[in-house]
Structures are given as structure tokens and as C-alpha cells.
Amino acid sequence: MNMENKRVLILCTGNSCRSQIAEGYLRFFAGERAEVFSAGVETHGLNPRAVETMAEDGIDISHQTSNLVDEYRDLSFDILITVCDHAKEVCPYLPGIQKVIHHSFPDPAQVRGSEEEIRQAFREVRDQIRTFCRNFAEKEL
């Protein structure tokens, strides 16, 4: 890793949907300019709908893992992005972070309804996160 690269941590409650989608997009948009990690204050496992929704947009996140933020205690990060209010509220102190960005996205895993309504909720959140990550990569990296 050269000195220009940033190390970014994306934090959510369960590291199953929103932070996983954001990790996938940020890796895509950042390319070699950043090392991207995601974690949760809990772990709920990688949500299969998140994997499926990202695959529809040509990005494979199936190899990503659901990690606890504590697993990254020994790494230093330049930027912390919280993608839900709960993660922002309970985020542990991480030394060395130069910038914290908060953007709360709705949790598509909480949506109830028909299969198509749930899929649509995942797509809407995915698209919001894609736009956020594209803009972040252009402005911050």
C-alpha cells in the first residue's frame, strides 16, 4: 500500500446488508486508492439478498465476511463511515481516524411485504449506497 492510499472502515449494526453493499461499491469506485473494510457492532452474517442485489449490478460481494469491529482494533483507519444511526451511537473509539462521515441508510432487511416489495427495497437502498460511494470516492480519495 502506498502512502497515498486511505484505509476506510464502513460500520453498521450487523455488517450484513448496508455496510456490505457499501464495501462492495467503495472497493469498486476506489480501485487502488483505498483499502476498504466493513464491520458491525454485532455480526448477523452476510445477507443473501444483499449478495443477490449487488450481483444484479455486476458486483460480487459473496466472498465478503461479516466481521465485528473489534477484529480491526489493531489496524489504523483514515476514514470511518457509519451507515446507520445505531452504529454511530455505539461506535467504539478507534484511534487514528482523521475523518468520520455519517450517512444513515434505511435497513432493507427490516422491510416486510411481498417478495417483490422486499427485493425493491433492497434495490432502492443499493442505489442510494452506490450514489453515496461514487460521490465519496470522487471527493475523498
Image (spheres, rainbow, N blue to C red):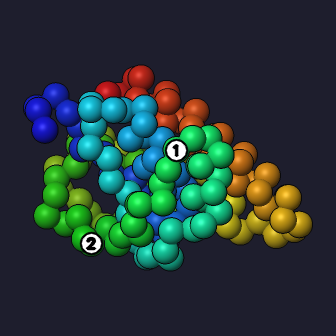
Q: Is residue 51 visible?
A: yes
In the displayed structure image, the side of residue 120 where residue 88 appears, left or right: left
Q: Amino acid at mark 2?
A: Asp
The residue labelled by disc 2 is 70
Image point (26%, 43%), residue name: 35
Q: Is residue 102 visible?
A: no
In the displayed structure image, the side of residue 3 where residue 18 appears, left or right: right
Q: Is residue 29 above or below residue 12?
A: above
**Residue 95: image location, x then y, percent:** 17, 56
Q: In 3D space, how far apart are the residues under numbered discs 2 and 1 (Cα atoms)? A: 27 Å
Image point (69%, 60%), residue name: 108
**Residue 81: image location, x then y, percent:** 40, 48
- Badge count: 2
**Residue 113: image location, x then y, percent:** 87, 68
Mark 2 vs 1, N-terminal side: 1
The residue labelled by disc 1 is 59
Label 1 element class: loop
**Residue 58: image location, x then y, percent:** 57, 41
Image point (52%, 44%), residue name: 59
For the C terminus, the image quarter is: top left
Q: Picture quarter containing residue 27? A: top left
User: Is there a contact, CB below 8 Å, between mark 2 and mark 1?
Assistant: no
Label 2 element class: helix
Q: Picture quarter containing residue 131? A: top right
Q: Amino acid at mark 1?
A: Ile
For the N terminus, the image quarter is: top left
Image point (62%, 41%), residue name: 57
Numbered circle sitting on residue 125: none
Q: Residues within 10 Å of mark 2 (few under 14, many from 20)?
A: few
Mark 2 vs mark 1, foreground winner is 1
Q: Is residue 71 above or below residue 33?
A: below
